[in-house]
Image (cartoon, helix red, strand yellow):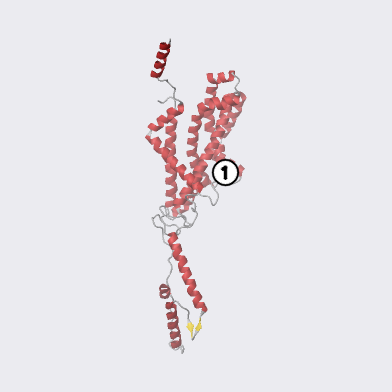
């Protein structure tokens, strides 16, 4: 008897237990094998790191500070401001009045001018027959202070400007980083709002069916029948305010329709599955069956749709800025930078357009490629 039990234990130790691999584990394995997906993920994480650093004030804190002359071109050293003028240059540039040949005081004036020049070159005050001129002494102090201020300003303005400066002398690189904070924040929060609305409405329609499904489908058809641009303008007119919160609400309230359609179909399919029927048989509530039992099996669809909407909403923010419903004055985003670049292109100033376009193109491309890889990794039909 003991030998039989010992043999069974040895056999159990020799044969490893077979455990089923979950959906997310399989997806992570597929993503790790895809080098393009991992590189795209690193780019997205880099932009998210810039977002956190910008929000915390570690970088791009003084993006609206004037650091160069207007429309300074891209260079590693910005265009220097007007330098301080020395005393010798002021004397050289001063206007010399013509001398009257019949002036009886000509010689006296010449002697006084010579004495004044000698006193100014020595840095002291002017003495007329033992009397000190206080005005000349004050002017000398003012000239020294003004020259020092110009020299300090010159040392502050000499810094690296890889993407040049805009109309107000602001660093375009810092504006691009600060604009990334606004655009990415709008894209992420608006996509989250749209996914929450679409998931909740799709779950209600697909789980309950009947008149609930008919009512929500009618609501869905109303939103999809209106052209997107007119729908955005209508919601913007109702809100009657301009700001980041307004953009998030506009995009979130108009972008949930695609999520609703997919989630509704998945809930209709999972409601008739055995595990849901078993949960219903033991008395589990409808709310728990919807969001505890079914939602984990359809969460990958919501995640993929959210990543798709982030890219779409970042581009939509640019469109809203062109339409006049973008960020308010004093807030910068990629959309507002591209809007400013319209008038700059006429003057041949291309660097703000290039900076915002390159930054947005890199993020959108990386996010799109990662979204495609994530969708393929979460597809159970692909092995």
Residue 381: % across, % down: 43, 24
Q: Which quadrant holds the C terminus?
A: top left
Question: Between residues 11 and 360, which one lies in front from this camera angle?
Answer: 11
Q: Is residue 20 above or below residue 4?
A: below
The one of 227 and 253 positioned closer to us in this rendering: 253
Q: Which residue is mark 1?
A: 245
Give the residue displayed 61% in from the left and 42% down from the top. 238
Give the quadrant of residue 42: top left
Between 372 and 342, which is closer to the camera in this rendering?
372
Viewer can see residue 52: yes
> Residue 207 in the image: x percent, y percent?
57, 24
Q: Is residue 354 above or below residue 257?
A: below
Q: Callout 1: few (<14), some (14-19), or many (20+) C-alpha neighbours within 10 Å?
A: few
Residue at 42% of width from left, 37% of height from top?
A: 41
Q: Is residue 318 visible?
A: no
Q: Is residue 249 left or right of residue 107?
A: right
């Amino acid at each position: 008897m003991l030998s039989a039990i010992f043999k069974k234990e040895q056999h159990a130790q020799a044969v490893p237990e077979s455990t089923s691999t979950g959906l997310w584990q399989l997806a992570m394995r597929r993503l790790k094998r895809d080098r393009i997906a991992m590189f795209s993920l690193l780019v997205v994480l880099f932009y998210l790191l810039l977002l956190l650093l910008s929000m915390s004030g570690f970088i791009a804190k003084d993006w609206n500070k004037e650091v160069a002359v207007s429309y300074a071109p891209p260079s590693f050293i910005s265009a220097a401001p007007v330098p301080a003028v020395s005393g010798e240059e002021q004397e050289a540039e001063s206007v010399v009045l013509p001398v009257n040949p019949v002036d009886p005081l000509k010689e006296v004036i010449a002697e006084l001018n010579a004495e004044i020049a000698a006193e100014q070159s020595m840095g002291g005050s002017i003495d007329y027959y033992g009397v000190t001129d206080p005005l000349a002494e004050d002017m000398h102090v003012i000239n020294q202070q003004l020259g020092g201020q110009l020299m300090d300003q010159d040392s502050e303005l000499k810094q690296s400007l890889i993407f040049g400066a805009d109309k107000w002398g602001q660093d375009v690189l810092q504006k691009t980083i600060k604009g990334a904070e606004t655009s990415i924040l709008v894209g992420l929060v608006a996509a989250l709002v749209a996914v929450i609305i679409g998931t909740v409405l799709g779950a209600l329609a697909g789980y309950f069916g009947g008149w609930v499904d008919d009512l929500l489908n009618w609501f869905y058809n109303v939103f999809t029948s209106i052209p997107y641009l007119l729908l955005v303008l209508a919601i913007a007119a109702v809100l009657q305010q301009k700001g980041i919160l307004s953009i998030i609400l506009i995009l979130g309230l108009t972008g949930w329709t695609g999520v609703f359609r997919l989630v509704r179909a998945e809930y209709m399919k999972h409601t008739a599955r055995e595990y849901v029927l078993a949960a219903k048989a033991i008395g589990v509530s409808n709310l728990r069956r919807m969001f505890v039992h079914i939602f984990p099996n359809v969460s990958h669809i919501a995640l993929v749709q959210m990543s798709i909407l982030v890219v779409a909403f970042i581009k939509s923010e640019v469109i809203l800025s062109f339409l006049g419903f973008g960020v308010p004055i004093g807030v910068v985003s990629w959309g507002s930078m591209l809007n400013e670049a319209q008038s700059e292109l006429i003057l041949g100033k291309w660097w703000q357009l290039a900076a915002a376009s390159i930054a947005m193109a890199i993020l959108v491309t990386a996010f799109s490629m990662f979204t495609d890889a994530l969708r393929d990794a979460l597809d159970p039909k692909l092995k």
